[in-house]
Amino acid sequence: MVATVAMVAGMPACEPPSPATPSYANDVRPILLAHCVRCHGAGGTLQGDPTMYPLGAPPAGYTPGSPKQCYFDEVEDRGDCTATDGGVGADCKRGLRTCAVLVGPYILPTSPKRMPPPPAMLNDWEQDVLIRWSRSPTFETP
């Protein structure tokens, strides 16, 4: 038993190789559903996650609160998102297609506003898939 534990502890993580061109349906959507949608779009709302800090205090420097934009439960924008002098319509809900360019900078562990906020964390494979997909020239979606 002890030898088995020692062998497993010394093994590298067994993550599949990142796809060269990640698929929204197979690669991206499951990550978003597991880590992002509860705050960015669950039920069509943006909300903070009260269960994120079970001990009651967020890490130093993090200001909890509701996300200001980006509904990851839908790919396309909803409502009146036509830009005018006063901004966009009050019913505008920016979808993932619009917000994909924001994904890369926020998911890196070195980001001061890392998403998802600590203590949650994306693994290296999930980060790589989201970054590759958001930078894809075809931005493959459903």
Image (cartoon, rainbow, N blue to C red):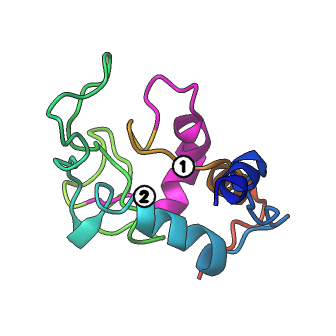
Instruction: Tell me the SS state at disc 2.
Output: helix
Quadrant position of the N terminus in the picture: bottom right
Q: Amino acid type of disc 1?
A: Leu
Q: Earlier in the sequence, mark 1 or mark 2?
A: 2
Q: In terms of depth relative to the viewer, which is nearer, 122 or 141?
A: 122
Residue 139 in the figure: left or right of residue 38: right
Residue 132 in the figure: left or right of residue 31: right
Q: Amino acid type of disc 2?
A: His
Quadrant position of the C terminus in the picture: bottom right
Residue 122 bears which disc, if any?
1
Q: Which residue is mark 2?
A: 35
Q: Is residue 103 visible?
A: yes
Question: Quick check: is 100 in the magenta stretch?
Answer: yes
Residue 16 in the figure: left or right of residue 122: right
Rendered location of residue 57, percent (x, y): 18, 28
**Image quadrant assignment for residue 34:** bottom left
Rendered location of residue 29, percent (x, y): 53, 72
Q: Are marks 1 and 2 in contact (CB under 8 Å)?
A: yes
**In the image, residue 32 above or below residue 39:** below
Highlighted magenta segment, given as a residue range: 92-114
Q: In terms of depth relative to the viewer, which is nearer, 21 or 59?
A: 59
**Which residue does the image show at 74% across and 68% down from the upper left?**
22
**Which residue does the image show at 14% across and 33% down from the upper left?**
56
**In the image, residue 6 above or below residue 15:** above
Q: In terms of depth relative to the viewer, which is nearer, 5 or 139?
A: 5
**Which residue does the image show at 21% across and 61% down from the upper left?**
45
Instruction: Tell me the SS state at disc 1.
Output: loop
Question: Quick check: is 87 in the magenta stretch?
Answer: no
**Image quadrant assignment for residue 110:** top right
Rendered location of residue 66, percent (x, y): 21, 43
